[in-house]
Image (cartoon, rainbow, N blue to C red):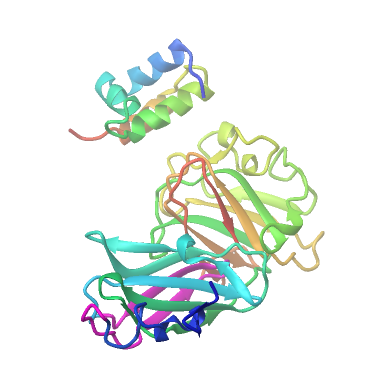
Amino acid sequence: MTYTKEQIDAAVEATSPMCFILHVNGEEYCEAVFVAMQLSHDQNAVLTDEDKALISGLMPSR
Amino acid sequence: MGEISGVSTADIDNVDGFFTTQSGGGGGTATTTPTISANVSTFGSGTLTITNASSYTHPSYKVEIDAGGSTIIANTAIVKNRTNNVENGTITWGDSSSVSGTRTVRVRAQEFGDNIQSSEVTTTYTRGTITNRYIRIRGVNSNGTNSSSRLGIGDIEFWTGSARTGTLYPTTHLTSATSETGIEVSMGHTYSSTYANFKACDSSTNTFAWLLGSSATNNWWQIHFESGTYSTPPTIASIKFGARNNSANYISIKGSDTGAFAGEETDYGVYYTPGDNTTYNLG
């Protein structure tokens, strides 16, 4: 898949820059980033409140 | 190489200097014949548990599966599970061969450093089929208990013949859950229409049925062969499961004639599906 800047921005906003970087660099898999990227791609950077709540629930506890 | 020193390599035990069930040149002593137990699901996903090889320090197992007079699964295609980099006696395989008939699993324990191996022990199994009005795929744990790890199905196919031969169901690319007469697909949880149930059977490999946010209870997808069209549901001998964004490391396959799945259903086994964007050919 290819992503637009807007789609990536939406995924980062819904997760966190740190998780996003670790995930895309392959250092630490993050389910929240994976799901956020798919939803952002399929919905063209528009994430609903339901999406954000789902993604938030997948974020790792640190 | 058919023979060594006039002895068939099929009976290599008796060739000096090679593996032997007698005390070997390296000083080792052969174990007694290993004890094996096999658990094979309907579509040939097998687990073999080997015990009684304790006289080996680091046993290595040679396993081959034969059918129809030839080897259908070579030793190199069989997964030998390890603990601390030593084979632990749990061996798995997937049997998607188009060869029909009874399978014979042949096992030997070997110790390369001491050039010894056990006598061969065998067990057999046959693959089965599914003939039910409802076939349900569920995300489960390795022991078959329900899992919330979501299903993601990019492409699923039900075939009447083994190894994806015969008639394919659904017979058309679905455009809705009921677009094909006599077939209805459904799933226990829908996150959004983007990831609807029929997208597991549509014409695109880029769309998928995704049970995002599923619970252990509703993490399932199913096909229904309706009685108005199918007086008898088709007999399914193989399934192609195309995982897409799939988090379920294992899936179960169950069949029911009522759709209740309340204890009346038939269990057709648990299958290991760990890879994302990976196709698993079952049966």
Q: Residue furthest left?
A: A62
Q: Is residue B192 above or below residue B127?
A: above
> For residue B104, what is the image quadrant?
bottom right
User: In the visual, does A8 lie left or right of A2?
Assistant: left
User: In the visual, does A5 lie left or right of B57?
Assistant: right
> For residue B90, what is the image quadrant?
bottom left
User: Would you say residue B59 is visible in this rendering?
Assistant: yes
Residue lying at 32% horizontally and 33% vertically, measured from the top left: A30
Q: Residue furthest front?
A: B5
Q: Position of residue B165 (x, y in %)?
A: 73, 58
User: Would you say residue B127 is visible in this rendering?
Assistant: no
Quadrant (top left/top right/bottom left/bottom right) for the C terminus of chain A: top left
Residue lying at 57% horizontally and 74% vertically, measured from the top left: B66
Residue lying at 65% horizontally and 68% vertically, measured from the top left: B130
Q: Is residue B59 above or below residue B150?
A: below
Q: Position of residue B224 (x, y in %)?
A: 68, 57
Q: Residue furthest top?
A: A5
User: In the visual, does B180 lie left or right of B207?
Assistant: right
Q: Position of residue B276 (x, y in %)?
A: 47, 42
Residue B150 vs residue B60, the one in the foreground: B60
Which region is colored magenta?
B25-53
Tell whether position B33 is magenta. yes
Q: Position of residue B52 (x, y in %)?
A: 29, 83
Tell whether position B254 is magenta. no
